[in-house]
């Protein structure tokens, strides 16, 4: 049951937003935060977020301050931080029980979030799920095998399985709408806005100088071959390397290879298969701060990437992305606005995709069916536009 807020929620002076925990999700919330700022132009808006994401919000017009927390920090510690802010309203974007408990421990009078089992007691206003919302259902191994014919089944079982398939997804199914629906509970406009991030010209120039890009006249392209969630989201390394070589040959570009410290082995493997001249690529995996990554993504003509946090960051900075999609759904969590023609989102016809699994239990056909030439032509098509 939805519990309605008190009248003081209509004109809050101090609002705290409990942000999401992952980079890509955080970028997708910027549409809702822009609408929140539009509604409450004079309010002080604080964002509670993981320390690793704090720099994402530097200079962002929607946020007056960030309140970071560290891995392992207790709900009591976070509640104490929030209590000091004397907030009137808390908007809880994640669906976890913990995120609702944090705001309850802070004693914030109005606490709004989606209704979910185990947390409704800690909220003062629970928001019902949108009718258009689509749950990302992880397919079972047996279903994947039945769909792909790896495990033959009778016609009766096969037909029964098909009735549980993913529905045809509309643009209103995208995750961005979930966050917009929440801010609408505060009276904000739920209409779509593109996710937006910002870097300054000074930051871009500083990144140019730090990484030796000041005097480069060739087109600069970005490559992000990693993805934190798991190997099912990663196009094969050897295909990335082959695509990069072919695009470099056709455009005389300079590739910037991005990634975190955990992506270094993948980046190194690709770099080892490229021409050795520094004029062809820079391997920056594990070497950039978040703000430096943003500046370099803004500098890039296009980003070739897996479905990942940097994919969302690039799109929100206005940089086109080319993305092979396998285990995940661009209709639900694709970059930028749903259906944005500026990006190239490549899928195969694999009947098991999207499966939303971390690892493929069969032959990885969703990614293997996306060929090198298809990716090359997609990147070249973006460059030419």
Image (spheres, helix red, strand yellow):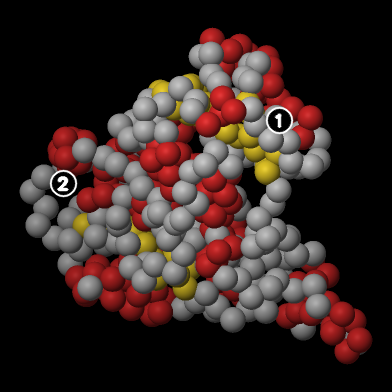
Residue drawn at point x = 59 percent, y = 81 percent? 349
Along the line of sight, which residue is nearer the eye, 59 or 126? 126
In this view, the residue farthest toward the bottom is 155
Labels 1, 2: front one: 1
| Callout 1 touching callout 2 (CB < 8 Å) | no
List x then y, in percent, for residue 227.
52, 52
Along the line of sight, which residue is nearer the eye, 209 or 315? 315
List x then y, in percent, for residue 335.
44, 58
Q: Is residue 269 above or below residue 184?
A: below
SS at mark 2? loop
Name the side, left or right, on which 223 lies relative to 25. left
Q: Is residue 354 above or below residue 9?
A: below
Tell me the distance, in whole angstroms, between the alpha carbons under discs 1 and 2. Answer: 50 Å
Residue drawn at point x = 69 percent, y = 73 percent? 167
**Res. 378 image quadrant:** bottom left
Circle nearer the N terminus (1, 2) = 1
Q: Which residue is mark 2?
A: 213
SS at mark 1? loop
Task: Using the rendered image of the protein, determine whether residue 257 is visible from the camera's viewpoint.
Answer: no
Name the side, left or right, on which 370 lies relative to 222. right
Q: Is residue 198 above or below residue 321?
A: above
**Res. 367 image quadrant:** bottom right
List x then y, in percent, for residue 336.
41, 58
Q: Quadrant of the N terminus?
A: top right
Q: Which residue is mark 1?
A: 123
């Amino acid at each position: 049951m939805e519990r309605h807020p008190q009248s003081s929620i209509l004109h809050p002076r101090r609002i705290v937003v409990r942000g999401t925990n992952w980079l890509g999700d955080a970028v997708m919330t910027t549409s809702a935060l822009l609408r929140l700022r539009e509604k409450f132009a004079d309010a002080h808006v604080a964002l509670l977020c993981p320390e690793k994401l704090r720099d994402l919000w530097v200079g962002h017009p929607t946020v007056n301050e960030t309140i970071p927390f560290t891995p392992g920090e207790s709900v009591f510690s976070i509640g104490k931080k929030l209590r000091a802010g004397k907030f009137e309203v808390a908007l809880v974007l994640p669906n976890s029980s913990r995120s609702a408990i944090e705001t309850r421990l802070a004693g914030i009078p109005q606490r709004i979030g989606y209704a979910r089992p185990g947390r409704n007691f800690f909220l003062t206003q629970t928001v019902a799920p949108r009718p258009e919302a689509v749950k990302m259902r992880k397919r079972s191994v047996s279903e994947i095998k039945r769909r792909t014919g790896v495990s033959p089944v009778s016609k009766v079982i096969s037909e029964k399985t098909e009735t549980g398939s993913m529905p045809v997804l509309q643009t209103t199914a995208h995750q961005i709408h979930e966050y917009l629906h929440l801010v609408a509970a505060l009276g904000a406009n739920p209409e779509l806005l593109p996710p937006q991030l910002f870097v300054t010209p000074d930051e871009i120039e500083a990144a140019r100088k730090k990484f030796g890009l000041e005097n480069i006249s060739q087109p600069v392209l970005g490559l992000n071959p990693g993805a934190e969630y798991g190997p099912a989201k990663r196009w094969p390394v050897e295909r990335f390397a082959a695509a990069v070589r072919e695009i470099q040959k056709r455009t005389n570009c300079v590739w910037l290879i991005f990634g975190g410290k955990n992506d270094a082995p993948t980046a190194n493997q690709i770099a080892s298969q490229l021409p050795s001249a520094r004029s062809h690529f820079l391997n920056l995996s594990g070497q950039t701060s978040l703000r430096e990554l943003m500046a370099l993504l803004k500098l890039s003509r296009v980003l070739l990437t897996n479905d990942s946090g940097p994919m969302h960051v690039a799109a929100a900075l206005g940089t086109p992305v080319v993305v092979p999609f396998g285990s995940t759904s661009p209709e639900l969590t694709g970059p930028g606005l749903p259906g944005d023609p500026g990006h190239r989102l490549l899928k195969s016809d694999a009947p098991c995709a999207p499966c939303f699994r971390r690892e493929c239990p069969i032959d990885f056909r969703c990614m293997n069916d996306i060929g090198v030439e298809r990716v090359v032509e997609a990147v070249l098509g973006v460059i030419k536009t």
